[in-house]
Amino acid sequence: MPLRPIFHRLSAVAMLSAGLATAASANDPEDHTMTQIRVIVGGESLPATLDDTAAGRDFAAMLPLELTLSDYHGIEKVADLPRALDTSGAPISYKPRTGDITLYAPWGNLAIFLKPFQSSRGLVRLGEFDGAIDPLTRNGDLSVRIERAE
């Protein structure tokens, strides 16, 4: 029996299966989307987007949050979170960029990066700001409110 007709039939079955899987995921009520948030600093609202990850979704579930961000070596602003986040599926390390919203899992704190930094084990990206973060670069502690942008 020639292999070519069998290969074509298998390819057709594979394409049909892929199409059904795509259609099923499009209608899946568990299908997630990125969450738009805002960080309010001294009356200024900074838009941001949380990643569609277990940690990003778990962080969104905590909102709204009132936090005090503290300077950490002039590279990031940090604050303790009220509980641990679900980091299942997260890479073991992450190299943050300016404007990244992250979790430092070993300490359980939120870390917003004001400058890029080296890849760090235990750092989990939650999302990023959608624009400038100038109000966060002020020296000293900052009171912020983080909420969903609905």
Image (spheres, grey):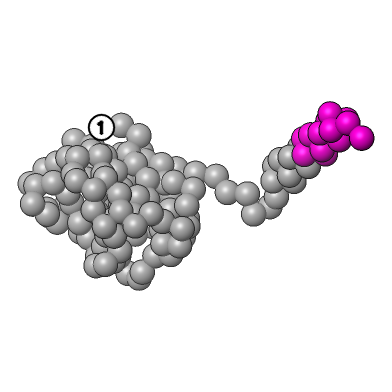
Residue drawn at x 17%, y 40% is 115
Report the side of 27 relative to 98 (left or right).
right
Q: Who is closer to the viewer here, 7 or 79? A: 7
Count of numbered marks? 1
Residue drawn at x 92%, y 35% is 1
Image coordinates of residue 15 in percent, x first then y, are 77, 35
Pick out the residue farthest to the bottom: 83
Q: Who is closer to the viewer here, 15 or 132? A: 15
Image coordinates of residue 143 in percent, x first then y, are 20, 54
Pick out the residue farthest to the right: 1
Image coordinates of residue 23 in percent, x first then y, are 75, 40
Report the side of 87 relative to 99 (left or right).
right
For the record, the magenta segment spans 1-16
Any part of residue 73 in sight: yes
- Decide: is 12 above or below 123: above
Residue drawn at x 18%, y 51% is 77
Q: Who is closer to the viewer here, 88 or 126? A: 88
Q: Which residue is label 1 attached to? A: 132
Any part of residue 60 in sight: no
Kindly report the secondary structure that dominates the magenta region of the rendered protein: helix
Report the side of 142 relative to 39 (left or right).
left
Q: In the picture, residue 109 is in which quadrant?
A: bottom left
Disc 1 marks which amino acid? Ala
Which SS class for mark 1?
Answer: loop
Residue drawn at x 84%, y 29% is 4
